[in-house]
Amino acid sequence: MPCYDFHKKTVKLNKKTETAGMTFAEVLCAALLLAVFFASIFELNAVCLRYIDATKESVAALQGVHDRAEALRNVAFTDLTTTSYLRTLLATAPNASDFCNRATEVVKISAYPTANGVTQLTRAANGTVTTNSTAADLGSTLVQIDVSTSWNTTLGNRPQSEQI
């Protein structure tokens, strides 16, 4: 049997002594980066929430305009052409949403197909109804009705409106 002679070799490794850790400046930079990151995330979240509020307002306005149009469709023609009846009808909001109680609503009624003046009523945000104009003759068979709602948006306080 062959005999093997194993020689042990010792190798010395030069080890530098280093301290593990971070300097104060590195910690401050890391903290600053984290603060900027989280501030950006929170601001992005706030902008998204404002966009959601603006979208809710648009949907509420559209629903309010449709509710008012449906209410006017269900009125007898003789009542529809009577200004005092319309003032009474417009005294209440088109639906019970908070948005409809703070938006301005305008209803215009004119004879169709040929207008002979326009009856226009405005319901302000506080609920007061104003007759802006009264048509000379709305006819006896057919009228055109325009309903619009306007408000200032939550996002940027810009004027916005919906119409049907």
Image (cartoon, rainbow, N blue to C red):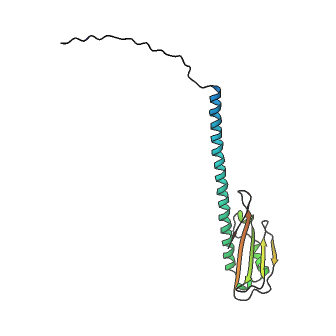
In the rendering, at what x and y percent does residue 107 appear?
74, 75
Q: Nearer the viewer, residue 134 or 39?
A: 39
Displayed quadrant of residue 38 = top right
Q: Quadrant of the C terminus?
A: bottom right
Q: Nearer the viewer, residue 101 or 13?
A: 13
Q: Is residue 21 among the parts visible in the rendering? A: yes
Displayed quadrant of residue 100 = bottom right
Displayed quadrant of residue 115 = bottom right
Q: Quadrant of the N terminus?
A: top left
Task: Please say if 78 is above or below 103.
Answer: below
User: Would residue 21 appear left or right of 69 to someone viewing this image?
Assistant: left
Q: Nearer the viewer, residue 123 or 116?
A: 116
Q: Is residue 80 among the parts visible in the rendering? A: no
User: Would residue 106 appear left or right of 63 to someone viewing this image?
Assistant: right
All told, the count of numbered labels is 0
In the rendering, at what x and y percent does residue 83 appear?
79, 80
Q: Residue at x 74, y 77 (%)?
A: 108
Q: Residue at x 65, y 61 (%)?
A: 56
In the rendering, at what x and y percent does residue 85 appear?
77, 79
| Residue closest to the far bottom | 140
Q: Nearer the viewer, residue 153 or 27?
A: 27
Task: Please say if 57 is above or below 28.
Answer: below
Q: Residue at x 67, y 64 (%)?
A: 58
User: Would residue 69 appear left or right of 123 to someone viewing this image?
Assistant: left
In the rendering, at what x and y percent does residue 152 appear?
74, 61
